[in-house]
Amino acid sequence: MKTKYLLFILGIAVFNGCTSNKNDTDQNNGKFTLTANNKKMIKIDTVKMAPVMNELKLPGKVSFDEDKVIKIFPMVSGYVTKVNVSVGDYVEKGQVLAVIKSSEMASFENDMVNTQSNVEIAKKNLSAIEDMYKSGISSEREYITAQKEYQKAVSEMNKVKNIFKAYGGGENTDYVVKSPISGVLVEKFINQSMQIRADNNNSIFTISDIKNIWILANVYETDISKVKEGYDVNVTTLSYPDKIIKGKIDKIYNVLDPDNKTMKVRIQLNNTGNLLKPGMFANVSVIFQEDNKKMLSIPSNAIVFDRNKNYVLVYKSDNDIQLRAVSIESSINNISYISEGLNSNEKVISQNQLLLYNAMNN
């Protein structure tokens, strides 16, 4: 890349040397000739009419995706023997969060042992009656009744097993609390040696999947008409001021906060690398069109600011490049809207134009 720039500058230097003998008329006309090497280093864009976009800046805050927040409640009462996680930890689905010693789990385990025993008894009884039925000693009715009793015992055993499994049954009558999803532990209301009651309305853990997060932005009453669902936004944070995250408004909360008289809008974002943390402040720039207004537009990169004026290099041909002063109405998203100085379908240089500008002014 350095070599290319050196060649570019050298080309300009050669050009300056070659044009030093040209008459004053050509220089006053602001014409400039591109060499073949120089042309490879530039980019040419066309002036065109485009809808005028504007920008509304809103204060916002990073929040959890409430559709991905899971609260875990204790299903049994007991004594907490172990807590394996802390707030802020990333947990995997199925990971053990805590262990609770519970008499209720002992009761479930006893029920499971009893139902297993009942299945064995019903199975032996069915086998004996089946042999007698085949030998003509037992009736068909007795055989059918034994089959039903066996099926009933198996059904009851499976029911108890499912309850025991749902309650996180472990060894030694432990109630094992496992994470139902992968995510970040955002709340913890349980500690070792605590007594837990199943009738408590408070959760013991809250887990959120932060692969996707929400940005909630406040819209002041005077700006409500300027935002609509589907509008593009650029989001920046204090932690990453140079990183622009693009998104769209996907929900408008059509209720004003009674305290600060603002309306909230929501932007859902894919939180790549988990860079955004819930609670962060965010700056939200909403991009919207101004009442079907259109103006001439060019890339902002094409503009050279010098001596309190804005200039562009207008490309007519390789032998005719003109320096033109322009008036800028506004700029947004690397697009500048021109009120004076250019015509539609003219071409401007939008890359390395500063080097050409310097050469033309020497």
Image (tube, grey):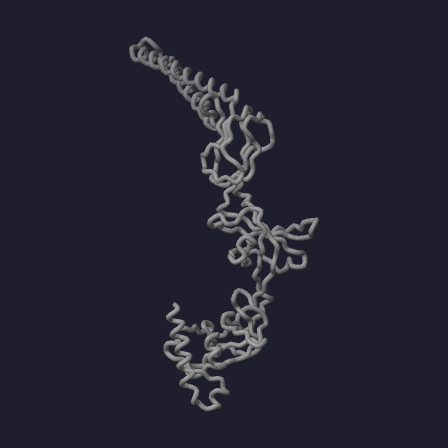
58 left or right of 130 in image = right
Q: Quadrant of the N terminus?
A: bottom left
Q: Position of residue 239 (x, y in %)?
A: 54, 52
Which x, y percent locates residue 105?
A: 50, 22
Which is nearer the eye, 121 or 28?
Answer: 28
Extreme residue in the right direction? 259
The x and y percentages for residue 87 are: 54, 38
**187 vs 175: above or below:** below
- Up the image or down, 232 lies above or below 318; here it is above
Q: Is residue 236 left or right of residue 223?
A: left
Q: Residue at x 39, y 13 (%)?
A: 121
Tell me, yes or no, if residue 339 can be seen here.
no
Q: Quadrant of residue 206?
A: top right
Q: Residue furthest top?
A: 137
Residue pictured at 57% horizontal, 76% vertical: 309
Answer above or below: position of 280 versus 225: above
